[in-house]
Amino acid sequence: MNNTEKLEILSEAAKFDLCGSFLCSKESIQRKPTLKGWIYPTTLPDGRTVRLLKILLSNDCIHNCYYCANRRDRNFQRVSFTADELVRLFLELRRKNLVDGLFLSSAVTKSPKYTMEQMLKTVEILREKHNFKGYIHLKILPESSLDYIEAAIRYADRVSVNLEAPKEDYLKEIAPEKNLNLLMSKLEMIKKLSERNLKPKSGITTQFVVGATREKDIEILSLTFKLYQEYNLSRAYFSAFQPIPQTPLEELHPTPTWREVRLYEADFLIRKYNFSIDELIFDENGNLPLREDPKIIWAKANPQFFPIEINTATYEQLLRIPGIGPISAKKIIKVRKEQKIKDIKDLKKLGIQVERCKNYILINGRSPFSEKQLSLL
């Protein structure tokens, strides 16, 4: 099998390992890249978007996770790259200006030690031999030792440890060979290394499989909040479960894709809008209501907070208004330094989602949908 054929197979297998910011929206329900099948865009902390070759080193797994397309007992074509083969492929794609960086993950082939060594060898060759300075995201396998994690952080801009489930009993239902305490210990190792000033410059990520077991949104988001607070997690990814043929969970119903979207919206409230986990509103089953954006649900449940005067509100107050995010809030504050916002047209010029915020704001003491303001629309 040539490298092009391997590329098609192993990039398809990599779609289950999430890494791109474009996934964290309603478009995530489509589960499709925006470019070629093996190129995924991701936004870096500095705002730049890079095109990643998103690929597995191997799909030949020794483990038997119930939800996974690469599980040991499933009948499919198994292929692997050597480190040298993958380096040559990446450099050729880069020479053709098709990719800027690499997201490298893998099934556990032969042994965890062997697989992690091959992944590290790949990125080491790129960095040391070919002087590649671009973006690399590297998955850390659950069994990785401290020295392997240290090497991963030295070579990669971002690393990920996928927890898959928020509690041990849930994890056992979908991946009986995995151990949540072991996975958390990898995050502990990364935390201790960061205290020695050795940390990935673009941060740490994790991923949860949503809906393959009985886990609740409040449990997923509570653990995510803890990871942000205590482990310096950069972001979490949520993957709505989709049944795969020839797996023990193939008869399960797929998770509603809106559940994934609501988790991302709630995650943004925690990560970017300064909401605490206690402020999020869940239904009687501990899940986010699917009918509406969690920020709007919070606003409706807290009428005492509104309406907010646009011309005097603090940044924190502006963030609580539906339709106004961090970028919009900063624009409002910047404009206010020069002159007051006079009417609804001024807000529209700033790109504010007027339809979403109309019931929660005042402009110079008046509702934007007073008779005078309406005439400006």
Image (cartoon, rainbow, N blue to C red):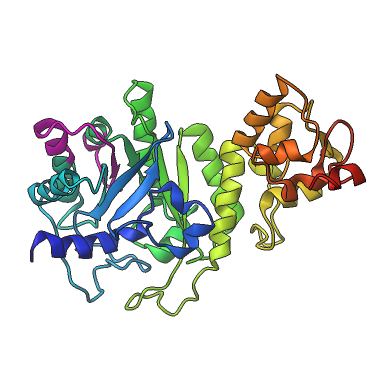
Q: Residue 223, percent across and down?
A: 53, 45
Q: In terms of image quadrants, where is residue 69?
A: bottom left
Q: Is residue 233 magenta?
A: no
Q: In terms of image quadrants, where is residue 150?
A: top left
Q: Is residue 90 left or right of residue 158?
A: left
Q: Is residue 327 left or right of residue 184?
A: right
Q: Residue 261, percent across and down?
A: 56, 57
Q: Name the residue rendered at 63%, 29% in the picture.
A: 330
Q: Name the residue rendered at 37%, 58% in the picture.
A: 33
Q: In terms of image quadrants, where is residue 176?
A: bottom left
Q: Nearer the viewer, residue 141 or 271?
A: 271
Number of marks in picture: 0
From the viewer's perspective, is residue 151 above or below residue 221?
above
Q: Nearer the viewer, residue 270 or 347?
A: 347
From the viewer's perspective, is residue 207 above or below residue 331?
below
Q: Is residue 147 magenta?
A: yes
| Chain part drawn in magenta | 123-149
Residue 231 visible, this angle: yes
Q: Residue 301, percent across and down?
A: 80, 49
Q: Residue 309, percent across and down?
A: 82, 32
Q: Name the residue rendered at 26%, 42% in the picture.
A: 101
From the viewer's perspective, is residue 181 above or below residue 79?
above
**Which quadrant is the N terminus positioned in?**
bottom left
Q: Is residue 152 left or right of residue 49?
A: left
